């Protein structure tokens, strides 16, 4: 019997500090930023990145949801560039442009490589789908995560296995943006995810 699971991926709300490169930097969301609760349904499987800007967003979007933490959904670690204003980064770092142009070949100082980030997110996604196909019931999930994670997932679902810097840059994911994915599980326990707009 076919089953259908619905996955909603949300980018976190506006952080209290903007204009900086935010990866591992753990700051809160802007308390004045309006967030309307999406659901009071406690049966939604709510999963968040461990960073505060995501867990705080999750608690405001789904006030009655029980939130689980998934470390694999945290943002890219920009190392020494993390939390630094963009203007300062462009003035002081000759390799920043190289990173944006080809993130697979250039790594931020003391930061995460694109290979590691991609492997982390895709390993989680593969394991998640493997567990999902064994579920006997249709389920709904809400994930609160980051732009970098959502870009990788969206491009992967579109068949892009190794996105270029240009492909990543061409996707603009605003605060509280949502990516909806429906996963159909067929009679052979194979998952068929598709993006739904």
Image (tube, rainbow, N blue to C red):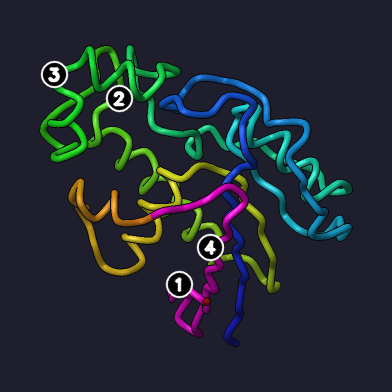
Judge whether residue 181 is colored magenta: yes
Question: Can you tell which mark lies on residue 94?
Answer: 3
Q: CA distance from mark 2 to mark 4?
A: 25 Å
Left or right of residue 122, residue 178 in this image: right
Q: Residues within 10 Å of mark 3 (few under 14, many from 20)?
A: few
Q: How many marks?
A: 4
Residue that carries the numbered disc 1 in the rendered image: 193
Left or right of residue 62, residue 29 in this image: left
Judge whether residue 43 is colored magenta: no
Question: Can you tell which mark lies on residue 8?
Answer: none
Q: Earlier in the sequence, mark 2 or mark 4?
A: 2
Residue that carries the numbered disc 2 in the rendered image: 112
Q: Earlier in the sequence, mark 4 or mark 3?
A: 3
Q: CA distance from mark 3 to mark 1?
A: 40 Å
Q: CA distance from mark 4 to mark 3?
A: 34 Å
Which quadrant of the structure image shows residue 111? top left
Residue 80, position in %: x, y?
Answer: 33, 12
130 to 113, vertically: above or below: below
Q: CA distance from mark 3 to mark 2?
A: 18 Å
Residue that carries the numbered disc 4 in the rendered image: 179
Residue 104, position in %: x, y?
Answer: 16, 37
Residue 135, position in %: x, y?
Answer: 63, 66
Region in magenta = 172-196
Residue at disc 4, secondary structure: strand
Residue at disc 2, secondary structure: loop
Residue at disc 1, secondary structure: strand
């Amino acid at each position: 019997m076919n089953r259908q699971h619905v996955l909603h991926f949300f980018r976190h709300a506006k952080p209290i500090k903007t204009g900086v490169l935010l990866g591992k930097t753990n700051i809160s969301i802007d308390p004045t930023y309006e967030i309307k609760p999406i659901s009071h349904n406690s049966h939604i499987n709510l999963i968040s990145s461990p960073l505060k800007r995501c867990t705080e967003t999750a608690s405001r979007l789904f006030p009655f949801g029980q939130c689980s933490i998934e470390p694999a959904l945290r943002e890219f670690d920009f190392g020494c560039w993390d939390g630094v204003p963009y203007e300062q980064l462009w003035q002081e770092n000759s390799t920043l442009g190289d990173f944006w142009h080809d993130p697979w070949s250039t790594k931020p100082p003391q930061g995460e490589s694109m290979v590691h980030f991609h492997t982390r997110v895709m390993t989680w996604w593969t394991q998640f789908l493997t567990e999902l196909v064994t579920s006997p019931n249709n389920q709904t999930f809400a994930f609160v995560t980051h732009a970098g994670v959502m870009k990788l997932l969206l491009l992967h679902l579109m068949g892009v296995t190794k996105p270029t810097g240009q492909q990543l840059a061409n996707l603009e994911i605003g605060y509280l943006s949502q990516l909806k994915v429906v996963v159909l599980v067929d009679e052979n326990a194979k998952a068929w995810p598709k993006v739904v707009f």
